[in-house]
Amino acid sequence: MMKKMLTLVLALCLLLPLLAAAETVPTGATLVLDSGAAPALFLPDGGLVYVPWQMDDHVSLPHTELRRVDAAGQLLWSSTLPAFRALWGGLHPLSGGDFLLFAELNEDNQWMQYVLSGEGHIKDSRALPRDIFPLMAAGDRIFGSLQGQEAHQLFQINLDGSKQPYHFPAVGDNVTVMRSMPNEAGHLLHAVGKLSQEEDISQRTADQVLLYLDEKGGEARYARLHNKKFVEGFAGDAVFNPQGGLTALVKDDYKDIFNRFSVISFDESGVQVWEKQYSLGVHSVSAQLINRLPAGGYLIHGAGTVSLEGQEGFVFRLQVDADGGPLAFSVRASKDGRMVRDGQGQPLVFNGWPPAAWAAPFESLPEMDVQMKVVP
């Protein structure tokens, strides 16, 4: 059942390009490409490695290459690959300057793993097993689950294809890693346990864990949520806090109310210390980034849509104190922009849609008036 749900999520992601109209490149854009970019990986030197995304009459054309541009958008190299669709988080940086790409070949639906050098040369390619999915890379470590009817088996997979069982803190190996995100000098892994077996799929729940792995793969910090639905739980990003734990972005099921998100702070044992829930006067919102401020408190960024039709989009920035109390709130207009981190870890608005992907500072976009409040 989990595999069917994952397939549905992927299908919806592929359908989105057919429903969107291109957003005009803003005057404040610092990087503009001559195609869409999906996926895209920002590099420390300000450049970008990305898969060019082209469309013809609202239909996505096959991906066939990987490109590297500098901070000004000038092409440094291009690598040609068989027609493919990017899978499982797309592009990943490896130690030594190489890049990892998970792909599905369009001709025969074979899942592939490509390792490309920093100059775009294919150093290695291998077929991936279809029964271990999804595949999430954290540095040179790859995680994937063998998903059974009664239980899952999580593996850590090496680049050469060898694997060994991996156990998550507090939940063991009966989990699926759903998301991997660079954070600090390491990675955050979001894992979901085996779902319960209620007849109504939407009501099935499982425990979730957010685990921080340092640059050597050590399990430095984690947080845990109990009995969350598949569409709920950790939103992907978190940051270190003074309690020795993680302060994380969380989404919940509000019975068809999509304009809320939570911030939950956990101590060094993964136990919740405090929670704040925020509501915006819009149709939907997604918190995407959280950074800790040098003077204390946190800076939260995200995106959303004003109405159900989704034609008026925005990105937001919320500053809160050490206990989640709001201090400042700002909203900027961007129909299809989302918040990402640049190569230096700073928040950046990015729109990867065809025909021209772009990146721009938050402050360069037009201001909007959106109300925000803390939910009692």
Image: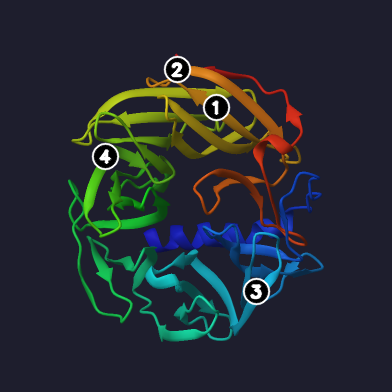
51 w.r.t. 251: above or below? below
Residue bearing mark 3: 76
Residue bearing mark 1: 318
Residue bearing mark 2: 325
Q: Residues within 10 Å of mark 2 (few under 14, many from 20)?
A: some
294 w.r.t. 22: above or below? above
3 and 2 marks in contact (CB < 8 Å): no
Q: CA distance from mark 3 to mark 1?
A: 36 Å
Label 3 vs 4, first from the N-terminus: 3
Label 3 vs 1, first from the N-terminus: 3
- Residue at figure coordinates x 45%, y 74% from the top left: 98
Q: CA distance from mark 3 to mark 4?
A: 43 Å
Q: Is residue 48 left or right of residue 221?
A: right
SS label for mark 1: strand
- Residue at figure coordinates x 53%, y 85% from the top left: 108
Q: CA distance from mark 1 to mark 2?
A: 10 Å
Q: Quadrant of the N terminus?
A: bottom left
Q: Is residue 139 left or right of residue 148?
A: right
Q: CA distance from mark 2 to mark 4?
A: 23 Å
SS label for mark 2: loop
Q: Which mark is residue 224?
A: 4
